[in-house]
C-alpha cells in the first residue's frame, strides 16, 4: 500500500469537476483508493463520497492506494492534485 | 424481446423517481455546467425550480449531505445512488440560503422534505438555479427514461424511471 499526502489547490475545493476527474482516474485502476480528511474517510471511486468529503482549497488529504498497480495510480493521482486538476 | 427468451431470466426492477422539485423539466444537456451537461457526474434530468423546497423523489437513505447543504446524495434499497445538486456553482454560497431537514443516515420516504433553499439568495449571487438530478452509479442502470416534460409538481408526478440491470 502506498500512502501520501496531497494539498487541495484547486479553487472551490473538490467539487463536481475535480471529483469526476478523480473518479475517472480511479475507475481505470485495479487498486483500492481511499481519501482521508482528518477522521473522515471516503472511497476514491465514489463521486458522491469525494464531493461530500468537504475538501476545500488548502485542505490536506491523505491518499491511500492499495493494489497491483498502486505505484502508477499513486503517481497519477498525485499529479492530478499537483496540477490542480487542470487537464 | 427474443433476447429475454434465450438469456438468463432475471427480474428487472424498475424504479420510479417522482419530481423532487416544483418547476419545469430541463434536459440535462442544457444545464449550464459542462460537468453535469456532459453527464460526467451521471445521467438523469434537471429541473428549473419555482419553489425553494427539495423533496425526496424516492424512498431512500441519505448517504451524502454536502457540508454547505446545497447538494444531497441518496441511496435506494435497490442500489441506486442519486445526486441532487441545487443550482450551479452553489458551493460558493458556503451554505447561505440553504436549510437542511435531514442528516446523513436518515431514512426518507418519497415526498419527504430534504432541503429548503432561498431562490432569491441564489439568483442574487448569480447562480443558475437549475437543479441537476443524476444517477451517480450508472453502471447498474440498464435503461433510464425521463417521463416528464414541461411543468411538474413536486411529489405529484414521476420525473423519470430507471430499469436496473
Image (cartoon, coloured by chain):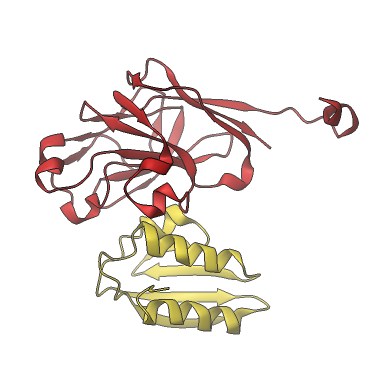
Front-most of B92 and A87? Answer: A87
Which residue is at 55% across, 67% downward? A26
* Location of residue B87 in the rendering, given as x and y in whole percent from the top left corner: 26, 43
Quadrant housing residue B27 = top left
Q: Quick one: quadrant of the N terminus of chain A?
A: bottom right
- Farthest residue toward the front? B30
Which residue is at 25% across, 64% downward? A12
- B100 to the left or right of B39: left
Does residue A84 appear anywhere in the picture?
yes
Front-most of B121 and B15? Answer: B121
- B26 to the left or right of B9: left
Quadrant housing residue B10 = top right
Tell me the yellow chain.
Answer: A
* Location of residue A38 in the rendering, given as x and y in whole percent from the top left corner: 33, 70
| As drawn, A70 above or below A18 | below
Which residue is at 49% across, 81% downward? A3
- Farthest residue toward the top? B156
Q: Colour of chain B?
A: red
Amino acid at each position: 500500500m502506498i500512502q501520501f499526502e496531497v494539498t487541495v489547490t484547486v479553487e472551490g475545493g473538490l467539487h463536481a469537476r475535480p471529483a469526476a476527474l478523480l473518479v475517472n482516474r480511479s475507475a481505470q485502476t485495479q487498486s483500492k483508493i481511499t481519501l482521508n480528511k482528518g477522521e473522515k474517510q471516503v472511497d476514491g471511486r465514489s463521486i458522491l463520497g469525494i464531493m461530500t468529503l468537504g475538501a476545500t482549497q488548502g485542505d490536506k488529504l491523505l491518499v491511500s492506494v492499495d493494489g497491483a498497480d498502486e505505484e502508477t495510480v499513486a503517481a497519477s493521482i498525485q499529479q492530478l492534485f499537483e496540477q490542480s486538476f487542470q487537464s | 424481446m427474443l433476447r429475454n427468451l434465450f438469456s438468463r431470466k432475471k427480474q428487472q426492477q424498475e424504479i420510479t423517481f417522482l419530481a423532487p422539485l416544483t418547476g419545469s423539466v430541463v434536459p440535462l444537456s442544457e444545464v449550464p455546467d459542462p460537468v453535469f451537461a456532459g453527464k460526467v457526474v451521471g445521467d438523469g434530468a434537471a429541473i428549473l425550480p419555482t419553489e425553494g423546497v427539495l423533496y425526496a423523489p424516492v424512498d431512500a437513505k441519505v448517504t451524502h449531505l454536502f457540508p454547505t447543504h446545497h447538494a444531497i446524495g441518496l441511496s435506494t434499497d435497490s442500489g441506486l445512488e442519486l445526486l441532487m445538486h441545487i443550482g450551479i456553482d452553489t458551493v460558493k454560497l458556503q451554505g447561505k440560503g440553504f436549510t437542511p431537514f435531514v442528516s446523513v443516515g436518515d431514512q426518507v420516504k418519497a415526498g419527504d422534505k430534504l432541503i429548503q433553499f432561498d431562490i432569491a439568495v441564489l439568483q442574487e449571487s448569480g447562480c443558475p438555479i437549475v437543479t441537476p438530478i443524476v444517477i451517480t452509479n450508472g453502471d447498474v442502470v440498464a435503461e433510464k427514461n425521463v417521463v416528464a416534460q414541461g411543468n411538474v409538481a413536486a411529489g405529484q408526478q414521476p420525473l423519470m424511471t430507471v430499469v436496473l440491470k
